[in-house]
Image (cartoon, rainbow, N blue to C red):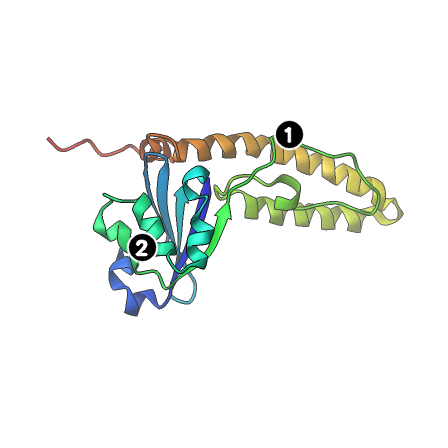
Amino acid sequence: MTFVELRLDDVDRAHPAIADLVGHGTMFALHDGKGLIAQRNGGAQVRVYAGLRTGAADDMAAAVQKGDGKAHLLRHFAGWAAPLLALVEDADAIAAVRPIVALAPGWRWPAQRGLTLVGDAAHVMPPVGVGANLAMLDAADLALALVEAGAGWAQAVADYEEAMLARAAGFAGEAQAGFAEMFGPDGARAFLAHMEISAAPARP
């Protein structure tokens, strides 16, 4: 997958319909291996992530460079509802084109004296809301291990790595499976099931 990140500024005044659509949290629209994800940020800003299969997005960076990024992106979402397309059409800027990468669940390295990793550097996984929380927990665990270890800091770092990598491995497989379901053929239903929310029955 590749995420094309867009930005809308001053949304409450300049883009009131989008402000209402997104609300004060995060909005997901998922269908047929693609998605539009919009998130309210601070400072009256909304970030939009347009998710595409990487093959479809291979020429996005070139289109952005030529100033044709939004038009190119909209072609991939032809037929989607107008309020959703406005997330792209009305964007103030394309902030980045981000290929999504991940390490294999359970990947690890031999301890090296004087060097360690925390957060995504240690266990990068798809963006499903776990990475930042694990990074903060990693940093806190490493700091505590160093404070308590004194002269035995090298062994404390190695012990931290074992615990941190074991914890990350437990989340990585779930993150990759959940991300694949989100951008599968029936992503919306899979996402609802993952969030343990029952989809409303179809109207006759």
Residue occupying the far right of the picture: 151
Relative height, residue 88 to residue 36 (above, below): below
Task: Give the residue type that dot 1 points to.
Answer: Gly
Residue 96: where, in percent of width, then height? 48, 55
Instruction: Name the front one of labels 2 and 1.
Output: 2
Residue at image x 61%, y 47%?
135
Residue 26: where, in percent of width, then height? 37, 50
Residue at image x 58%, y 31%?
170
Residue 22: where, in percent of width, then height? 31, 54
Relative height, residue 163 to residue 44 (above, below): above
Q: Quadrant of residue 111?
A: top right
- Which residue bears the numbered disc 1? 106
Q: In which quarter of the image is residue 23?
A: bottom left
Question: Left or right: 153 with respect to 107?
Answer: right
In depth, the one of 2 and 171 nearer the eye is 2
Task: Give the residue type that dot 2 points to.
Answer: Leu
State the CA–CA distance, disc 2 to disc 1: 37 Å
Say which label, 2 or 1, has the lower sequence index: 2
- Which residue bears the numbered disc 2? 87
Q: Residues within 10 Å of mark 1 (few under 14, many from 20)?
A: some
Question: Left or right: 116 with respect to 24?
Answer: right
In depth, the one of 157 and 112 nearer the eye is 112
In depth, the one of 143 and 37 nearer the eye is 37
Question: Left or right: 13 with respect to 68?
Answer: left
Relative height, residue 182 to residue 75 (above, below): above
Residue at image x 28%, y 58%?
18
> Looking at the rendering, in which quadrant would you find the C terminus?
top left
* Secondary element at image label 1: loop
Relative height, residue 140 to residue 31 (above, below): below
Using the rendered image of the protein, determine whether residue 113 is visible from the camera's viewpoint.
yes
Using the rendered image of the protein, determine whether residue 119 is visible from the camera's viewpoint.
no
